[in-house]
Amino acid sequence: MSNWLDIVGVTEAGVEALPARVKNLVDEAEIILAPGRFLGQLASIGERELVGWNSPLSAMIEQVTKNRGRPTVILATGDPNWFGIGATLSRHLERDEFELHPALSAFQLAAAKMRWPLQDVVTLSLHGRAVENLHPHILPANRILALTSNGETLVGVAQTLIARNYENSALAVLENLGGTGEHIRSFTAGNAAGQSIGDFYTIAIECVAGPDAALLPPIPGLPDAVFSHDGQLTKRQVRAATLAALAPFPGALLWDVGAGSGSIGIEWMRSAGKAKAICFESNKGRAQTIALNAKKLGVPELKVIAGSAPASLEGQPAPDAVFIGGAVADKAVFQACWKALKPGGLLVANAVTLEGQAALFSRHEELGGEMCSIAVSNLSAIGKQSIFKPRLPVTQWAVRKPVI
């Protein structure tokens, strides 16, 4: 199908400031979809079907696709392909059905005002997304530009920084960038309460760590203490080795089966952009703890399924990788995971019991892969003397499913 849709980026200067070629597309369209603040600028353009956006997102997509084949223009803020409707529609339309006409994005305008080289800045959207997504990026001296939903986003950002002992972080609220109402104000996270701002702004954050701030980088191996758990936790050193064996990559889906506290799934999502994870846990209390851990560690979109495997695995999207941390010796669980795993995907399983180890050795004999024993000792004491006290060794099996 030939191009019938043009997605046009508009700055705060308004529709009249669009380049002539792009303005012609607007003038010639049969249908124009836009937020209300842009539709108000189009009242004088003649006979056009002007349509305001519907919520939720699924309704917006339906609004667009039902006009397939008719000359249609979407007006959106800034660069529609950067956390915008263009990025969304690219998942629902064929490439030759639409064309993008970006304007300067809020990120570009904000970076210019802050004098920050944009290539060195984290850009993320908190528009319609949980503010906890900020957590993986809260690191000393990190610079962040974030899109917002409304005035409450600033409150959530400041509270999150304060809770992480980053209350001295510098914040700038950049309102209505590029328009007549442009306004910039700066303060620290600790002084954000009570600030009077509108709903259309971008937040610039320069992270300043307090003396007691925990360092929680996206590299796997977070301290055990940051996870709430009842003892069912893959310990730090073993967790780091396990994530290395699983090899996370952007957009990949992990099944964490017998997830315990969810540490493997959580660190999988933190370590690669847009990586996804489903944690399967039979204990309902632990399933609730997984959700809490995911939220406080910056991956609130992690999916948790409470139920016993293999039944709980049915109907879920095929994973790119599987970690089996519980019920390692259960043949039915393994077979269900292996069947669901995508060809070329990785399966990693850890065992500490003799029964679990025996199952892994048997599967290694049949399917190959790599086996290793991970032994960790921690400093302890006997009386006044220091010793290294060994933990239970972990047997790990990692195997790639053949591509046939």
Image (spheres, rainbow, N blue to C red):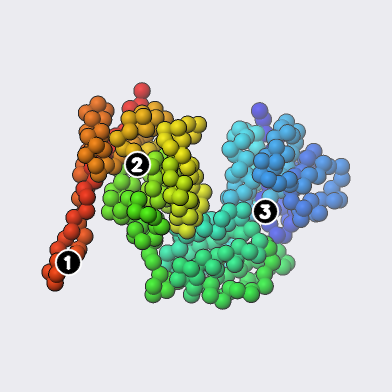
Q: Say the numbered circle drawn on residue 381.
A: 1
| Residue type of the residue flagged with mark 3 | Thr
Q: Looking at the image, which residue sits at the far top?
A: 404
Work out whether residue 30 or residue 92 is closer to the camera in this orientation and state it.
92
Tag nearer the camera, 3 or 2: 2
Tag nearer the camera, 3 or 1: 1
**So how many labels did they put on this image?**
3
Q: Would you say residue 267 is visible in this rendering?
A: no
Residues at marks 1 and 2, CA–CA distance in whole angstroms = 31 Å
Q: Residue at x 48, y 42 (%)?
A: 305
Q: Residue at x 53, y 56 (%)?
A: 124
| Residue type of the residue flagged with mark 1 | Ala
Residue 163: where, in percent of width, then height?
A: 48, 68
Where does the N terminus fall, quadrant-wise? top right
Residue 17: where, in percent of width, then height?
A: 73, 56
SS type, badge 1: strand
The residue that mark 3 highlights is 77
